[in-house]
Image (cartoon, rainbow, N blue to C red):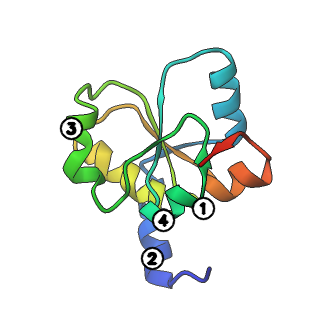
Amino acid sequence: MDHSKEFLELVTDAKSRVTEVTVDDVLQRQQRGERFRLIDVREDDEWRAGHADGAEHLGRGILERDIVGRVPDKDEELILYCGGGFRSALAADNLLRMGYRRVRSLAGGWKEWNDRKMPTAK
């Protein structure tokens, strides 16, 4: 997908404040049994088509509205992902602004997850 210059500037700005993690980071942490929430911020139809195994869905359109009810502990670690790592960076930046202290964005997002043949669910 081609992204506008303006959109990419927003993403670059958000990524200056957001920590990114890799698929390998997530896999290793899952294998060690570490606790974190993997949150898919894609649209409903993208989620229904397939998502990372063990993820929960909280679409970007409602994330900021519903996050406090779903995750009241602002110290809980959240790893967000989207299709390619752009929307999740924007979402993570907003959650940081809302007071969440341990928010990460998955670099490469769902595309990287699939390319690496990681476990998925429908």
Return the residue at label 2: 7
Relative side of 46 to 107, left or right? left
- Mark 3, Cα crowd under 10 Å, few <14 / some 14-19 / many 20+, is some
Find the distance from the CA under tag 4 to the CA under tag 3: 24 Å
Return the residue at label 4: 45
Return the residue at label 1: 84
- The vertical placement of 41 against 95, above or below, is below
Task: Give the secondary structure at mark 4.
Answer: helix
Find the distance from the CA under tag 3 to the CA under tag 2: 27 Å
For residue 27, the mark is none
Q: Identify the residue at image location x=56%, y=34%.
A: 54
Q: Amino acid at mark 3?
A: Val
Number of marks in picture: 4
In the picture, residue 61 is in which quadrant? bottom left
In primary-sequence order, the first of circles 2 and 1 is: 2
Q: Identify the residue at image location x=78%, y=54%.
A: 115
Q: Identify the residue at image location x=63%, y=55%.
A: 110
Return the residue at label 3: 68
Mark nearer the viewer, 4 or 3? 4
